[in-house]
Amino acid sequence: MSILLVLVGLALLVIGGEFLVRSSVALSFKLKLSKLVIGMTVVSFATSAPELLVSLQAALDGVSDISLGNVIGSNIANIGLVLGITAIISPLIVDRDFYRLNWPMMMLLSIALYVFLKNDLLLSAIEGFILLISLCVFLFFLIKNSINSLSNVTVVDDVDETLAVVSTFKIALWLLIGGLGLYFGSEWLVDGAKELAQSVGISDYAISVTVIAIGTSVPELAASVIAALKQEKAISLGNLIGSNIFNIASVLGLTAIIKPITVNPETPEILSTNIFWMIGFAAILVPLMLWPKRYQITRGNGILLFIAYLIFIVGAFT
């Protein structure tokens, strides 16, 4: 039964997240927002909604292990699994914004999260607010930089123009479906994860950092793999890294503001091992983009990332 709850919960999160993205973009067009702003803010927030609902539901249920495991595991999966598999299919070209804005911000937030948690084993409301404000400042400079350069082309291409003519009734219906999918999906996923952890004798955290994290990364994986196979357009490394930035700053930031997140003393691997995996996967991207080919994540790099991710998964269960 616990496995069924997890699978149904993940399915509802994927469906709910898709409808929320569609309705949010359509509503943004109604409000006359530019495609650049929609792509960088509305879409990014909407695609982080599944992680947010899962983390918030877990925190409210008193299972903060799942809140932290979900984000830490998702960030590791985005690089090791999603980026690794995508690069194996089709090497990625690294643009200038990656090492000027996206990567430094991801590293800064990753280290800040470790410092906040290590300090008192708590991510407080104030610290959550700091993370959220940092995201707003980052988005301001990102949008400003995109307006002044050609880097907004990829972001604009990611926004579906057909959603500009969607009726208000359909937007409301999509919002309702998205909201219900995310609500019930997060609730059933958290309940199923707790039951599954108890039945197989491992921690809630181990389930969240692996099963839940992979599940909430499925949309990014599917989109990246399809784009790589079709080779329709360049896959933006910045979009994958942006997802990690939003996971820490908006998902954990908002969750901590509503309900402070505590580190469970029974799962010391959160701060002793796994958060260093997250920081390590982030840090290794710069050497990989310089070797063996400059400004490119090659197939060989993708294989290394994927193997490292498999090692992480094995370690999480042992």
Image: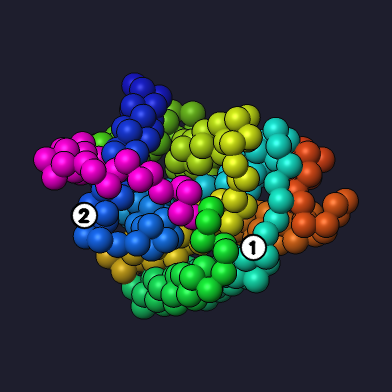
Res 80 → quadrant? top right
Left or right: 189 as drawn, with respect to 265? left
Q: Residue at x 53, y 73 (%)?
A: 148
The answer to which of 263 and 42 lies nearer the viewer is 42
> Distance of mark 1 from mark 2, alpha carbons?
31 Å
Identify the residue under disc 2.
30
- The crowding category of the residue bearing disc 1, from other C-alpha atoms within 10 Å (few below 14, some 14 to 19, many at least 20), is some
Query: What is the tally of numbered marks visible in this picture?
Result: 2
- The crowding category of the residue bearing disc 2, from other C-alpha atoms within 10 Å (few below 14, some 14 to 19, many at least 20), is some
Q: Quadrant of the C terminus?
A: top right
Q: Amino acid at mark 1?
A: Phe
Left or right: 23 as drawn, with respect to 310? left
Q: Residue at x 13, y 45 (%)?
A: 168
Nearer the camera: disc 1 or disc 2: 2
Identify the residue under disc 1.
98
Q: Nearer the N terminus, badge 1 or badge 2?
A: 2
Report if residue 162 is visible in the image: yes
Left or right: 234 as drawn, with respect to 257? right
Read off the magenta span.
Answer: 155-179
- x, y (%) of residue 182? 28, 41
Element at label 2:
helix
Q: Is residue 255 magenta?
A: no
- x, y (%) of residue 156? 46, 54
Q: Is residue 58 above or below residue 317?
A: below
Q: Amino acid at mark 2?
A: Lys
- x, y (%) of residue 232? 59, 36
Q: Main secondary structure of the magenta part?
A: helix
Q: Is residue 171 magenta?
A: yes
Q: Residue at x 63, y 29 (%)?
A: 229
Q: Quadrant of the N terminus?
A: top left
Q: Residue at x 52, y 68 (%)?
A: 146
Q: Is residue 122 above or below residue 232?
A: below
